[in-house]
Image (cartoon, helix red, strand yellow):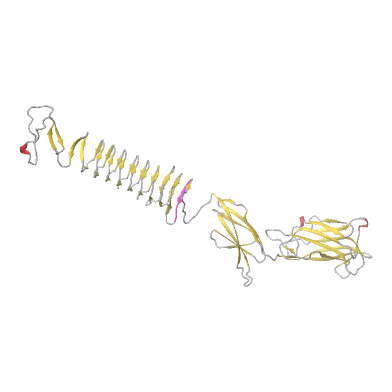
Amino acid sequence: MNSRSITADRLLEAVPDDPAPLSVSTASKTKLGVIRLRFTKAAGVPDAECTRITVTLPVGDSNTDLTSNPGNIDYKHSSSGRSWSITPSGDRATYVCTPSGPGGKFIFTDTAHFTLILDAIPVGRLPGEASLALTASTATNQLDEEDWTVSITKAVDDFFFFRAFSCEQPQIPNNGTATLRWEGSEHETEYWLSYDGRDPQQVTGQSVQIEGITDTTTFVLDARTPNPDTKEFDQHHYLSTTVTVKEPTIVAKELTAKRINVPQTLTADSSNKTTTLHGRTTFEEDVIVMAQLIVNGTITNEAGTVQIEASSGSITSSGTVQGASLKAGATYGIANNGAITGSSLNAGSGNITTSGTVQGASLQAGTTYGIASNGAITGSSLNAGSGNITTSGTVQGASLKAGATYGIANNGAITGSSLNAGSGNITTSGKVSDNGEILRFGTRVVIRNAYHSNEGLNEDNATKAYVSLKQITNGNARWRWYLDRPQ
């Protein structure tokens, strides 16, 4: 058997029915091509007998390879005469075509043809020319083998496309990894990714992974194409996608809300050491503020403790501060223009100062400043230590003790079942009474006899600085003397 290569006396010719280039695949999308290889008799030669045709595809990842994955290629044929049997190799890179029927021959005449159809070819990603290797067993007078190649063109689509930008998982755990995918042109296209205020970074391929995501994040992908005039990649095409984070870490320069519900712990440690809340704020557990907590509404602490960690910190509120335990540190105490209520109020060595009401089962102002209030002070136990209880209103309680030095200073009434000034003074510009009977009123007193109204002071002592009683001569045991209100 002789072998002929590509010469003018070749008996068969093979050309693709569709000479258009096959579109190359991209990283995100596999393009499927079809080749219809039509075999006919060469012009000017006698009718030729054919017993076999073999077609081999170039397989690999280079620009001269047709495909890197031929395993799923479909095959069939068409013929002007008898049918053919197609036998692919195991990987479907080679196809052996033989005529069916008696004699196993196919006669190529001027009108006879055989077409091998290869469909669903996964076209490679690199543009170029892929050469199919052909071998045909043909004869006019004697059987020969002809070997030649047919070129198939692979090309990039000449249109731009950019679509389907998304996150593989729409929600990830805190500090998790986001996998981003998209579809788009690779020819003359650059992709730049930005998120969270970061500068755009160029990414290759059509997917990327971003690690360490701690908060819900929006990713923006910019597909840049050349400017037709300058050839610079300054034509922008944007797509965005958002991934949410379960139990995120929130970092904000400023947080403003009408209401904040914190199921566990709110910790504030901003650059100016200040956390400001507007409106009603409810904390179910502990609240720790490193310096100053400013509330323009109401703080309600249902279970935990509102605590200022810094010794020079403050709890400042224009509304109500209320809770089981309120502690403001060692220096400034609690400053409030409204009411302070609670079962335990402790200012440390600082002050509890208010223009409203200070009320509670136990009120202790420390060892230095005491409790200063322009309103009423009430309680079952009021102890100023060595300080003062000072008020322009009423001081009232079962036990009032002003300490060893200053006593109780009051421009109003002092009432109680037990009044103890220690070594100090009880001073008042009002009345002093005992069991409802007046002991003193103002700066004057009158002495009278309970049974003889006409027997009082000696008349001859009336103008002296001191007075003496008339002598009682009848020894009546019922004689008593009382201070009386001056008339």
Residue range (magenta): 264-270
Is 69 covered by the magenta stretch? no
Pick the residue in front: 241 or 247: 241
- Outermost residue, front side: 487
Does 427 sit left or right of 352 as displayed? left
> Residue shown at 35%/41% (left/top)?
360
Where is 162 relative to 355, above or below? below
Give left or right: position of 54 versus 127. right
Where residue 9 appears, as percent x and y from the top left, is 89, 69
x and y, in percent, of residue 32 in the image = 74, 59
At 46% across and 56% down in the image, what residue appears?
A: 254
Furthest toward the right, the residue is 141
Q: Can you say whether 110 is above or below 330 in the image?
A: below
Give the x, y percent position of residue 123. 74, 61
Residue under the image location 82 percent in, 62 percent down: 37
Image side of residue 216 versus residue 395, left or right: right
* Residue 388 in view in this figure: no
Residue 326 seen:
yes
Q: Is residue 215 left or right of residue 409?
A: right
- The quadrant holding residue 273 is bottom left
Location of residue 458 in the rendering, given as x and y in whole percent from the top left corner: 7, 36
Specify the farthest residue to the left.
Answer: 460
* Quadrant holding the N terminus: bottom right
Quadrant of image for the C terminus? top left
Farthest residue, direction bottom: 229
Name the residue nearer the viewer: 135 or 372: 372
* Residue in front for this viewpoint, 60 or 322: 322
